[in-house]
Amino acid sequence: MHESRLGNLLGAAVLNLSDRLTAASAAAAGVSLSGTAALVTLTEFPGLGGTELGRRIGLSQPACARMLDQLAARGLLQRRERTGRAVAVVLTRDGKAAAARALRARQDVLAAALRTVSETERAVLEPALESLLRGLHAEVRSADLLCRLCDRAGCTAQDRVCPVGQAHREAG
């Protein structure tokens, strides 16, 4: 079955940007892609437990535990005991710096890609992407997973509402 031209264009752009964005982010953080997602997520949500962190970045509990062991061994995060068996995961100063580098690298890739898009085209592209993301959320059903490498502050700057966060709230 043949895809539409729009589908082909979207697929090629998304695949290329995904490859570039994830490679640049992980290289800047100096860790795996899942490690980068963990660092970025913990920047926004410090103190998550390993199980919850894994859920938010799409890893099983055992896989997340192994990744956390690797990040802790590199001095990027610490586990802190809470009550019972619960453990809070927090970034160290080095972990926060690695997350910031990853977000900057991500932004650099996206800014370079958007340089060829005119202001008029951007005015059409932004609402189209908001609609696309709301639809993707309806399938994925997880704002955290969908936005695991997002610069959340960038999405909500100037009192704007994140379309994924809004879709998540509306889905209840």
Image (spheres, grey):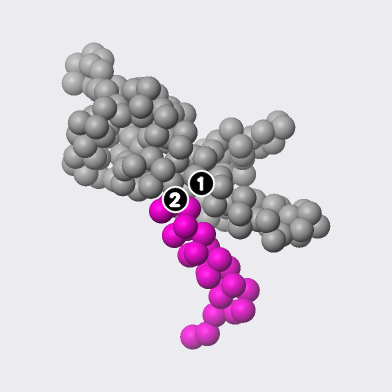
Q: Residue at x 62, y 50 (%)?
A: 111
Tags 2 and 1 touching, CB below 8 Å: yes
Near mark 1 (Cα within 10 A), the count class, few <14, some 14-19 or many ≥20, is many
Indicate whether residue 96 is drawn in magenta.
no
Near mark 2 (Cα within 10 A), the count class, few <14, some 14-19 or many ≥20, is many
Marker disc for residue 120 = none
> Where is mark 2, residue-wise?
24
Within the image, what quadrant is residue 128 found in? Answer: bottom right
Q: Is residue 26 left or right of residue 66?
A: right
Q: Amino acid at mark 1?
A: Arg
Along the viewing direction, whichever of 77 and 105 lies nearer the viewer: 105
Examine the residues drawn in magenta and state their main secondary structure: helix
Q: Is residue 18 left or right of residue 163?
A: left
How far apart marks 2 and 1 lie (CA) works out to 6 Å
Q: Amino acid at mark 2?
A: Ala
Which range of residues does the magenta coloring cover?
1-23
In the rendering, at what x and y percent does residue 22 appear?
Answer: 43, 52
Indicate whether residue 20 is drawn in magenta.
yes
Marker disc for residue 106 = 1
Along the viewing direction, whichever of 123 and 3 lies nearer the viewer: 123
Residue 140 vs 71, above or below: the answer is: below
Q: Residue at x 76, y 58 (%)?
A: 118
Q: Is residue 148 left or right of residue 154?
A: left
In this rendering, the count of numbered labels is 2
Residue 47 vs 154, above or below: the answer is: above
Look at the image and tell me whether residue 142 can be seen: no
Q: Secondary structure at mark 2?
A: helix
